Image (spheres, rainbow, N blue to C red):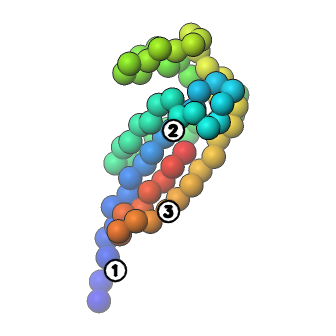
Amino acid sequence: MEPIQKTVRYVLEIYKPMNVDDLWMKFESPSPFMAIHVGEVINPGLWPGSEAPQKVLRVLHVEHAVWEINDRINNLT
């Protein structure tokens, strides 16, 4: 019996500055995102519908989660 091929979905969530409970932007992709590290700078100005409170944002925290739902593996960063 061959192993079941599972699909993977990658999700990148950005939270509003200084509020880890307030989701600001969510990106989903069938392929991995580039690595993001604490201390890097992100420019939110080109995001759809962005009303960025600042011109650039500094990454303060990175968290990863992996879970499975209905034979789909989800990877959240």
- Judging depth in this view, the residue of 32 and 56 nearest the camera is 56
From the image, tell me which residue sits under label 2: 13
Q: CA distance from mark 3 to mark 1?
A: 18 Å
Q: Residues within 10 Å of mark 3 (few under 14, many from 20)?
A: few
Q: Nearer the viewer, mark 3 or mark 1?
A: 3
Res 39 → quadrant: top right
Residue for point 48% across, 53% down? 75
From the image, tell me which residue sits under label 3: 67
Mark 3 or mark 1, which has the lower sequence index? 1
Quarter occupied by the C terminus: top right
Q: Secondary structure at mark 3?
A: strand
Whether 6 is drawn above or below 50: the answer is below
Residue contact at pointers 2 and 1, CB within 8 angstroms: no
Residue for point 38% across, 57% down? 8
From the image, tell me which residue sits under label 1: 3
Q: Secondary structure at mark 2?
A: strand
Q: CA distance from mark 2 to mark 1?
A: 31 Å
